[in-house]
Structure formats: C-alpha cells, structure tokens
Image (spheres, coloured by chain):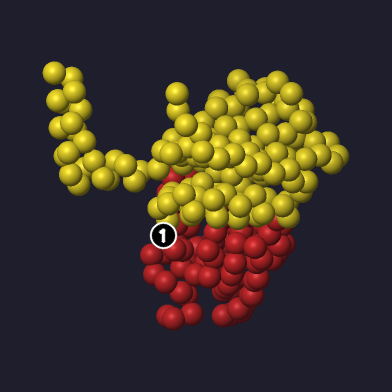
Chain colours: A red, B yellow
Amino acid sequence: MNLSTEVIEKSDKKKILKVAGEVDAYTAPELKANLNPLTEQEGAEVVVDLTEVSYIDSTGLGIFIGALKSAENHDATLRLTGLNDRVKRLFTITGLDEVITIDDENTEEAK
Amino acid sequence: MERQSDYLEMTLPAKPQYVGIARLTVSGLANRLGFSYDDIEDIKIAIAEACTNVVNHAYEETGNMHLSCNVFEDRVEMVVADTGQSFVLEELDQNLGPVDSRKPIDELKEGGLGLFLIDTLMDKVEISGENGVAISMTKFLQRDEVENNVDGVSTETNAQEQK
C-alpha cells in the first residue's frame, strides 16, 4: 500500500514521472505533489510511466484530471504510458481515455 | 429460506491510511470465496471508493467507517457505513456518469467518479442516508453460471420438474 515516484529528466522540456505501487486516497497526495510541478512548467512534455502501478481508483484518476488541466493551462502536454489491463480498464470505464492521451506501448524508457 | 453462511465486520478510523486495510480485507475474503481475479479487483475498487467517500465527506473532524460483509453461497453483500452527515441523495444521482469528452478540459471535475465506479463494477448497489450514509454493494459469484453452461444437466432437470 505504498507509492514511490521518480522523475527522469530527458531534456529541459521532457520529463518522465515513473510511478510504482498503489494509487489510492492515502497515496494520491504524494502523486499529486510530484506530478503538479512538472505540468506547471511552461511548454513541458510530461510522460507518466505507470508500468509499476498495480492499483488505482477514482482518487488517482482525479489527480490525472487535475494534471491535465494544469498542463492545458501551461501549454504543456500530458501522456500516460505502461498501463496494465486493470488500470487501463478504469480509464476506459470512466471515459478518461477520451480526454487523456494514453500510450499502448509499454515503458517509455525502452524507446 | 436462504442459508447465510458467514458474517464479518470491522470498524476502522475514517482516515486515508485505513482505506487500504478495508481493501485488503475484502480482497482476501473474495479470494477465499473463489471470485475471479477481475471480480476481486472490482470488489477492491468498489470498497475503496465507498471508504474514500466516508473519509472525504462523512465527518467534519474524526469518525469511524464500518465495513460489514454477508457471505452467501452465490454472492457477497458488503456494506460501508458511517455515522456522519448524510448527503442529499438526489444531488448524487445527477452527477453519476463517465467523463464527458465533449466538455472543455477546464470544466472536467476531479471528483465524483467514485460512485459511478461502484455502480458500474458491482452487480447491485443500494445507498441509504438516514443516520449517516450506508452503501450496500453486492457481487455475485459467476462460478455457477459457468458450470451450467458447461453441462446442461441442471437445465434439463428443471425442465423435467416443470412437467
């Protein structure tokens, strides 16, 4: 029931946030605290790698909606990658896959 | 009369760090009852959503959330209840639904998906709001259906009985 995050700076603009663990009401604030500074950078390309995320619920989905808004306001982009089937399913059920860019590829680092 | 096999309940502080405890509890229970991997994940999410609602909305200061599970042969009924301030049920129904992708991003709401997920992932959901809020969620075991499909014996037996 823990969460860990790591920021990988690919360039000035491109940042990858690697997230591992479970995103729920307890851990979501930590995700938010690590994700928001990235999307608040003007013109940033933010990729969130969810390969190691085993569980997410609506609290986590809300964080990504917030991050999408933040990116929109700062002329930045937000992309999610590495979602397992369960995590992907929640984005589909809630219709969030229609508003947030989601990769079908696995991890960003492999590219 | 239906035979009820087991009942279990637990009371947890309405704090974010205990949502995961409730989730693990129902995960263990559902696993023991023979639910499929996907159904166990659905149950985990539904319970977490119900508990998260309690944590975020039920109490102005501190309080408890109550998880109870009734185990039947063909299903499990789980109730997450609080004794906090009841919310307006009509107001909730209007907000129940997936994200509308036609809306501008700025108008998307960051909350409100929890009850929609519960409703989508569980087979039967009932919300009551008198002394606090109680959400009752039922998930059926799919095991019997599969067995019926595999051999038609039970169907034939039923047909014969009707004659």
- Quarter the N terminus of chain A occupies: bottom right
Give the image quarter of residue B85.
Answer: top right
Q: Amino acid at mark 1?
A: Asp
Q: Which residue is mark 1?
A: A85
Residue B161 vs residue B83, the one in the foreground: B161
Q: How many marks?
A: 1
Q: Give x and y (percent) for residue B23.
A: 60, 51
Residue B112 vs residue B73, the one in the foreground: B73
- The extreme top residue here reads B163
Residue at 35% x, 43% y is B142
Decide if residue B106 is in sight here: no
Residue at 48% x, 80% y is A109
Residue B32 vs residue B37, the one in the foreground: B32
Up-down relation of residue A37 to residue B61 (above or below): below
Give the image quarter of residue A103.
Answer: bottom left
Chain letter belonging to callout 1: A
Up-down relation of residue A109 to residue A22 (above or below): below
Q: Give x and y (percent) for residue B44.
A: 54, 50
Up-down relation of residue B10 to residue A15 (above or below): above
Residue at 78% x, 46% y is B13
Q: Give x and y (percent) for residue A84.
A: 44, 63
Quick check: A107 left or right of B151?
right
- Quarter the C terminus of chain A occupies: bottom left
Residue at 63% x, 39% y is B68
Mark 1 residue crowding within 10 angstroms, few (<14) / some (14–19) / many (20+): few
Q: Give x and y (percent) for residue B1.
A: 45, 23
